[in-house]
Image: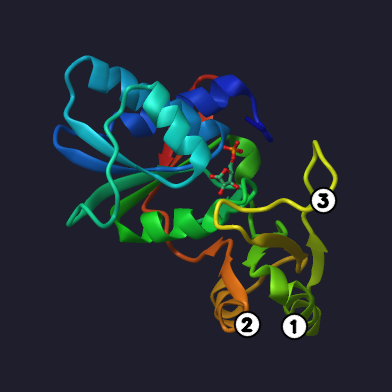
Amino acid sequence: MKSTGGSDAEKRAAGESAAEAVEDGAVVGLGTGSTAAHAIRAIGRKVDSGLDARGIPTSFQSRELAKEAGMPLTTLDETDAVDLAIDGADQFSGPHLVKGGGAAHAREKIVDAAADRLLVVADPSKEAERLDHPVPVEVLPDARTTVAAEIRALGGSPTLRSAERKDGPVVTDNGNLVLDCDFGEIPNPAELATDLAALPGAVEHGLFVGMADEIHVGREDGVEVEE
Ligand code: ABF
């Protein structure tokens, strides 16, 4: 699992802190990434000790991890409500997030938006005064060139994400491609989110505007919860 930014101890502290919020009977959205993985393992241990909770994975990776952790799984089709989601981020500024470093942001956004509460788990390297992280945009393969042109027209610089361990592009769990779009500093995330959502062939972008209810920031000496 690719790990970014802060230390594993910081990520673990954040993940385990958010996992404490999972109560008996809960349906939990399970985020992707190395920090959310700590939360999934911690919830798995609680399930092992008798907690009744079901998870909705946001990626192949989080599904496999949840199965390994012994967590019962469900889907959005089978449940009326998602009590909370626990998910990582590539960058956060207040309640605004950039996500999609794991190319799972389309499913993450569906599950996180369906949840009553979104608990973001992060290490301190993810915090920014203003968002300036490149925004991942998942595109239908046929639309990669036209969406890239539209991104340039919006002032961004798109790069097709390529796979690290083999030749060719990253392919998402949905069979699509990812353009990492550098806009520099993003003064108005809501406006950019609206523009990106309007592009034909763009399946989902990684701006999660105002979506975080709590951010659990793991530090070497404890956890700070920002609300
Ligand atoms: C997923 O994993 C992504 O949306 C986000 O890009 C990334 C964070 O990974 P990590 O916790 O490993 O830094 O949640």
Can you see residue 92?
yes
Spatial separation of the CA atoms under disc 1 and disc 2: 7 Å
Query: Can you tell which mark lies on residue 150?
Result: 1
Q: Position of residue 85 (x, y in %)?
A: 35, 46
Q: Residues within 10 Å of mark 2 (few under 14, many from 20)?
A: some
Residue at which label 2 appears: 199
Dot 3 amino acid type: Gly
Q: Position of residue 106 (x, y in %)?
A: 51, 60
Closer-to-camera residue (124/74): 74
Q: Position of residue 30 (x, y in %)?
A: 39, 41
Relative side of 20 to 15, left or right? left
**Residue at 52% in and 33% down:** 35
- Quadrant of res 133: bottom right
Q: Are marks 1 and 2 in contact (CB under 8 Å)?
A: yes
**Residue at 70% in and 68% down:** 141
Q: Secondary structure at mark 2?
A: loop
Closer-to-camera residue (124/23): 23
Q: Of callouts 3 and 1, which one flags the residue occurring earlier in the amino acid sequence? A: 1
Dot 2 amino acid type: Leu
Q: Of callouts 1 and 2, which one flags the residue occurring earlier in the amino acid sequence? A: 1
Q: Secondary structure at mark 3?
A: loop
Dot 1 amino acid type: Glu
Q: Residues within 10 Å of mark 3 (few under 14, many from 20)?
A: few
Spatial separation of the CA atoms under disc 3 and disc 1: 23 Å
Q: Quadrant of the N terminus?
A: top right
**Residue at 58% in and 61% down:** 206
Q: Of callouts 2 and 3, which one flags the residue occurring earlier in the amino acid sequence? A: 3
Query: Can you tell which mark lies on residue 168?
Result: 3
